[in-house]
Image: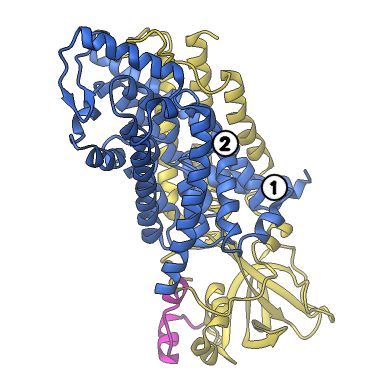
Amino acid sequence: MKSKTRLILFSLAVLGWSGVLLYFYSSGRINHYLAPDFRLIAFAGGLGLAVLGLFNLLTAGQKIDCCHDHANEDDTHDHDGGDMHPVTAVLLMIVPVALSVAWTRDEYSVAALGRKGLYAAPPSTLSPFLAASIPALTMADIEKSHRMTSDGFLEFSLMELFFSSADREMQALLEGLKVETEGRWIDEKVRNADGSRKRLYRLFITCCAADSQVIPIVLEFGKMPPDFPENAWVKVSGTMHFLLEEGAIQPVLVVNRAVAAEPPFEESFMRKKRF
Amino acid sequence: MSPDSQQDFALAFLSILFEGLPFILLGTLISGFIDVYLPAGTMDRFLPKNKFFAILVAGLMGAVFPVCECAVVPVIRRLVKKGLPVSCALTYMLAAPIVNPITALSTWKAFQGQGAEMMTSSRLLLGFLIAAGVGLIVSKLPLSAVLKSQLVESLKNESEAEASHQHGKSCCDHSHEHDHHSHEEPAPDHRLTAALRSALRDFIDVAVYFSIGVSITALFNTGIAPGAEWLDSLAKNPTAAPAALMGLAFVLSLCSTSDAFIAATLAKFSWGAKLAFLTFGPMMDVKLLFLYQTVLRKRFIFLLAIGLFFAIGGISIFWQQLVFQAK
């Protein structure tokens, strides 16, 4: 393949990747894929790729020297050649991205959520990082750091409720407390013989969606739960309990009220950010 | 693939791609500018005369001349031909993809919330130690045991030509000959074009393997790939987990500037196994197997792969126990 054609092909492939990156950033869809720290870096990367692709596309016809020596005849150092045929290389770059853009719904299926901990037992011990992210250990601190609704429920993040299963002090403070939280609505598939339970979850993203972990709690209604679509955002209020079920302490919210909620701007819990 | 599997693959694939791309771009831009703006022989002048210290310094040269493992093989081929000792060249080749600021930055960024400082410093230290160790061993071996026979012949011819036309000065067993064969320097605007053209070429080389690697990772990450469950089952085994991840790193052939973003998603695996993945991958993988054959003897490559596997695996297991016992 001619050097100029190869350059044009490579430039177009890079511009294609740049276009995808810039589109996801500008449309806000990138929020489902990356933690906030990485979004601006991704945007800069998209711009950088655009500059690289455009520059090479516009100068593809220019002949240049390579600036260093090719002293030996057996120095096969090839400025244009890659590891594989250029068309193969471009296809390997473009096809998975194009398929992914076509297939993505910006969220995981229930099967993948299951793999990421939707129905796993809550943690029994906290990692140092997570321990540091749960700040309050006295009721006064809890009341100071959490807003109270007009009908007397303290607003908690799902993450706090989930990880309190591993924190005895927090459990003691939260047991029997009236709390309100929000998350996504999904069927409870374990320990739900009478069908009175649902599950509320959110995704905790450290860097990107691939490393995300599902943070769930159990919702107990004591009767048939209300009907919300799977994965709908729901705000629930009720009384918090920690039940020993199959050898693990399970955070269970006995629900008084469940209403549909607007999806929050952020899909996930973020580092250094609280509900 | 079912619609659900397609959706899961797409989310995992795009998220890892978006996360790693900027770092690959940064690495290839730097590599492109080094290729064009750095005169041949510059690296040579940084090395001390003492062979031992020269190897140690070569292991740190990636901090000044950062290149990923794809770019480093052509570079060391050129450097060896220009008289750089093979021991120093191999040390640089193995260390530079790890001991460089771009890899350090991407590792630190990828492991935020997962002991980023510890993982980054451990990776750099282990990469340096392993590379320097290989360099010291290679310094005791004859050239013919390490380099391809054509390259050894080429070096012999060069040294004979050098002897008949000697005006280089000896330093650390290598010559600092003048470059008689360089092209004239192009105009500055052509150099910029050459640099960005080189960066584009490097980017494509790396992006292709990254795309393949991310695809495989996304399949494992979402449980679509056959064997994902089996791989998970090894995650808690202190010996099998580092071995499995080194095997995965070998197959995935990821760039060192972006492999940390993959490693960080392997949540079920221990810290030590991830360290093994991050150290072994940039030194030995499928694509490097082919690239190394342009410089090294096949027998040496085989022994290098075995040696790296056991050394990195062993140290990672030991390091894991040390770190967690200390905690």
Q: What is the secondary structure assignment of the residue under circle 2?
A: helix
Residue at x 48%, y 10% (from the top left corner): A3
Quarter of the N terminus of chain B within the rendering: top right
- Chain A painted colour: yellow
Magenta segment, which residues? A129-148
Location of residue B46 in the rendering, given as x and y in whole percent from the top left corner: 20, 33
Quadrant of the drawing holding the C terminus of chain B: bottom left
Q: Residues within 10 Å of mark 2 (few under 14, many from 20)?
A: many
Residue placed under numbered mark 2 in the picture: B211
Give the CA separation, mark 1 to mark 2: 17 Å
Number of numbered discs overlaid on the protein picture? 2
Per the picture, the main secondary structure of the magenta-coloured stretch is: helix
Residue drawn at (44%, 41%) of the image: B256
- Quarter of the image holding residue B194? top left
Q: Amino acid at mark 1?
A: Gln
Mark 1 neighbour density, 10 Å: few (under 14) some (14–19) many (20 or more): many
Q: Secondary structure at mark 1?
A: helix
Which amino acid is tagged 2? Ser
Query: Is residue A160 positioned above or below B1 on the image?
Result: below
Chain bearing tag 2 is B
Q: Is residue A182 above or below residue B214?
A: below
